[in-house]
Amino acid sequence: MSQIIDSFRSSTWGWLRGTLAGWGTLLLCLVGVGFVIILIKWIANLATTYEVTEDRLILHKGIFVKSIDEIELYRVKDVRIDFTLINQWADIGTISIASSDETTRNGDLIIRDVDNARTRREKLRELVNAARLKRGVREIDMVHEDLPA
């Protein structure tokens, strides 16, 4: 089994301080409703853990009923990061992973509210390149161009 390089969850604290929804929830804490929202967000974040090894990104989902899914890093096509001005201030971001793996057949894997998102994205990109080199895999995009009549 490969050694785990990084393990993380979406950050509830990062969501609170780094998004407008989080700030609104903190304001709702003044009337008591916000604490329920924070608890729900915390449990949702607790339900999914991401582990990065030199070969795979492993998703552990669930609290009572658990599932494990993984993306082979050599299949990753793109690792993107998005963040708002508030996200930048809180040092969180949203990482999107596009791959040819079955896990992402319905769309990109979106990991929200990630602490140190820039650093994690860069490390993931390096591991993707290393996994491709190790397996001798090259990405070839097939572009369909219409021929003139």
Image: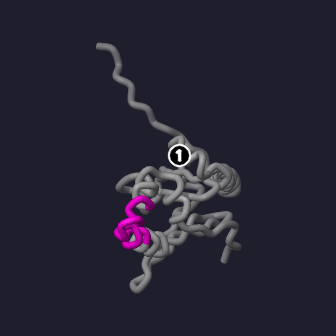
Q: Secondary structure at mark 1?
A: helix
Q: Is residue 147 magenta?
A: no
Q: Which residue is mark 1?
A: 86
Q: Quadrant of the N terminus?
A: bottom right
State the image coordinates of residue 76 (x, y, percent, origin top left): 54, 52
Q: In the rendered image, is residue 64 in sight?
A: yes
40 up-or-down from 139: above or below = below
What amino acid is at disc 1? Ile
> What predominant SS class does the magenta segment belong to?
helix
Q: Residue at x 53, y 71 (%)?
A: 49
**Percent x, y of residue 117:** 61, 53
Q: Residue furthest top?
A: 149
- Front-lying residue, 139 or 15: 15
- The residue that appears at 59% across and 45% down in the rendered structure is 88
Q: Position of residue 35 (x, y in %)?
A: 41, 71
What range of the chain is rendered magenta?
26-38
Q: From the viewer's perspective, is 69 left or right of 6?
A: left
- Residue 36 among magenta residues: yes
Q: How many marks are shown on the rendered structure?
A: 1
Q: Who's the residue at 55% across and 67% down the image?
A: 9
Left or right: where does residue 138 sit relative to residue 25?
Answer: right
Q: Is residue 138 above or below residue 56?
A: above
Query: What is the image's colouring?
Result: one colour
Quadrant showing the C terminus? top left
Q: Measured along the vertical axis of the image, is residue 15 above or below residue 7?
A: above
Whether residue 78 is visible = no
Residue 46 spot, x, y in % from top left: 49, 74
Q: Residue furthest left?
A: 149
Farthest residue toward the front? Answer: 30
Depth order, front residue of 115/138: 115
Q: Residue shown at 47%/69% (left/top)?
A: 45
Q: Residues within 10 Å of mark 1 (few under 14, many from 20)?
A: some
